[in-house]
């Protein structure tokens, strides 16, 4: 009974950081794995061989293949060096959202959350689902939400307010 306005609205193709991620099960090199400490589905683009099995396994369309070298589109410093905070992506590999693991490590929010909230406060919330006192847990307890394709048993951990 979802209203048409919601059913037909565009949805970000975020990685859903599944509790049971099918992408990790099909990766022949172990380039994709679920971090046990916080459940973030990670990817080592340097171990990726570009087979795209993970793309086929992901029911959310959350992965992309680099058909061309993305480095010309990445900002560099005055000496032409790439940021050391995030690995340089290359042609022929798959990539995905990792909730900006390098920012989480520093105690910051993912960049998408920060950018969205600079436009309209509260647009996106990120936090620890296992902490009952976190903002995200409070919102999930108080608001009506939905997740994509829960019937597949992947346990998506991205929620949308309805």
Image (cartoon, helix red, strand yellow):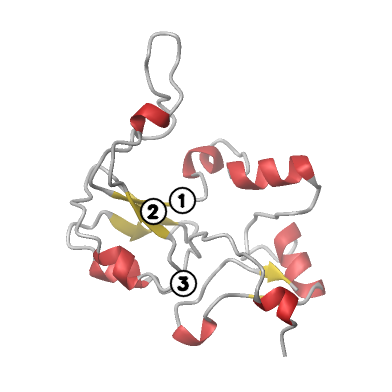
Q: Nearer the viewer, residue 133 or 116?
A: 116
Residue at which label 2 appears: 42
Q: Residues within 10 Å of mark 1 (few under 14, many from 20)?
A: some
**Precedes in sequence: disc 3 or disc 1:** 3
Tell me the element at label 1: loop
Q: Are marks 2 and 3 in contact (CB under 8 Å)?
A: no
Mark drawn on residue 98: 1
Residue at which label 3 appears: 19
Relative vertical location of residue 24 with respect to residue 111 in this rendering, above or below: below
Name the residue at 43% across, 24% down. Answer: 83
Q: Residues within 10 Å of mark 2 (few under 14, many from 20)?
A: many
Instruction: Specify the quadrant that holds the C terminus.
Output: bottom right
Relative vertical location of residue 144 with respect to residue 46 in this rendering, above or below: below
Q: In the picture provided, is 117 more to the left or to the right than 92?
A: right
Nearer the observer: mark 3 or 1; the answer is: 1
Where is residue 142? Give x, y as percent: 82, 73
Disc 2 to disc 1, how far (Cα)? 6 Å
Where is residue 40? Give x, y as percent: 46, 57
* Residue 62 makes an appearance in the image: yes
Q: Quadrant of residue 158?
A: bottom right
Disc 2 to disc 3, how far (Cα)? 13 Å
Name the residue at 67% across, 42% down. Answer: 114
Q: In the picture provided, is 148 more to the left or to the right than 95?
A: right
Q: Are marks 2 and 1 in contact (CB under 8 Å)?
A: yes
């Amino acid at each position: 009974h979802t209203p048409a306005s919601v059913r037909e609205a565009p949805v970000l193709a975020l990685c859903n950081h599944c509790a049971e991620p099918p992408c990790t099960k099909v990766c022949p090199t172990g380039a994709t794995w679920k971090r046990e400490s916080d459940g973030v589905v990670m990817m080592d683009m340097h171990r990726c061989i570009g087979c795209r099995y993970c793309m086929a396994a992901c029911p959310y369309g959350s992965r992309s293949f680099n058909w061309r070298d993305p480095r010309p589109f990445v900002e560099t410093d005055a000496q032409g060096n790439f940021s050391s905070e995030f690995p340089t992506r290359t042609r022929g590999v798959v990539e995905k959202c990792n909730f900006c693991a390098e920012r989480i490590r520093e105690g910051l929010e993912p960049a998408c959350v920060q950018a969205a909230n600079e436009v309209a406060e509260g647009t996106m919330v990120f936090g620890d689902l296992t902490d009952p006192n976190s903002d995200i847990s409070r919102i999930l307890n108080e608001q009506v939400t939905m997740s994509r394709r829960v019937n597949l048993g992947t346990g998506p951990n991205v929620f949308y307010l309805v």
